[in-house]
Amino acid sequence: MIRTLTRHFGNNSIDVKQILVMDGGGNGVKTMRAFKESDENFITILDKNQVTERKFKYLKNKKRYKYGDADIVDCKIELIDSLEKDYICELRAVIISWDNGRESVLVSDISADLLDASEIVKRYFDRWPMQEKRFRDEKSGIN
């Protein structure tokens, strides 16, 4: 979610934005619909079975990812709710074609005015080192 938090430092204050970054395990259309209908924002990755060519539209020109070895395309994706077949959830998508041949698709409800495609990708993948280290540390404590 992009939530504005105000931090106070003496007589000064700054606004800090937060984004909920979700793993692909909890990103059903029902969950994404709930975010879309709220004031909160998210970024998540789609599993291969959630991605088909016919669902992409408004594809923009391919650009080079600012922070790594990939090309990225900003677009929209239509996702069908498996529990409510008549409902189509349209979200922003970023297709990442990594130089090693792999492909990933991220979805978000964050507008391009707030974060460009490279920033969406960076924020999603930056979560891994911190999350994995915390998981490893917690797991080692209990063996």
Image: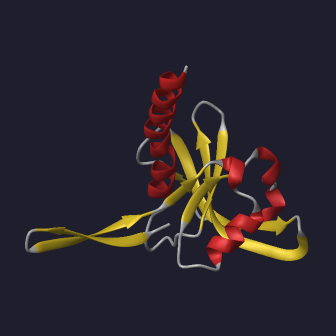
**Which quarter shows the C terminus?**
top right
* Up/down of 46 relative to 139, above or below: below
Residue 33: x and y in percent read 71, 72
From the viewer's perspective, is 69 left or right of 56?
left
Furthest toward the top, the residue is 143
Residue 55: x and y in percent read 79, 63
Query: At 68% across and 67% down in the image, what residue appears?
Result: 32
Query: At 8% across and 69% down in the image, what residue appears?
Result: 10
Q: How many callouts does the rendering have?
A: 0
Report whether residue 59 is seen.
Answer: no
Between 125 and 104, the residue placed more toward the observer is 125
Furthest toward the left, the residue is 11
Report whether residue 19 is seen.
Answer: yes
Question: Which image quadrant for residue 84?
Answer: bottom right
Question: Which image quadrant for residue 28?
Answer: bottom right
Residue 107: x and y in percent read 63, 60
Query: At 80% across and 56% down in the image, what residue appears?
Result: 53
From the viewer's perspective, is 123 left or right of 15?
right
Furthest toward the right, the residue is 85
Query: At 77% across and 45% down in the image, what residue appears?
Result: 48
Between 29 and 96, the residue placed more toward the observer is 29
* Up/down of 111 relative to 70, above or below: below
Colouring of the image: secondary structure
From the viewer's perspective, is 96 left or right of 1?
right
Between 2 and 74, the residue placed more toward the observer is 2
* Up/down of 12 relative to 64, above or below: below
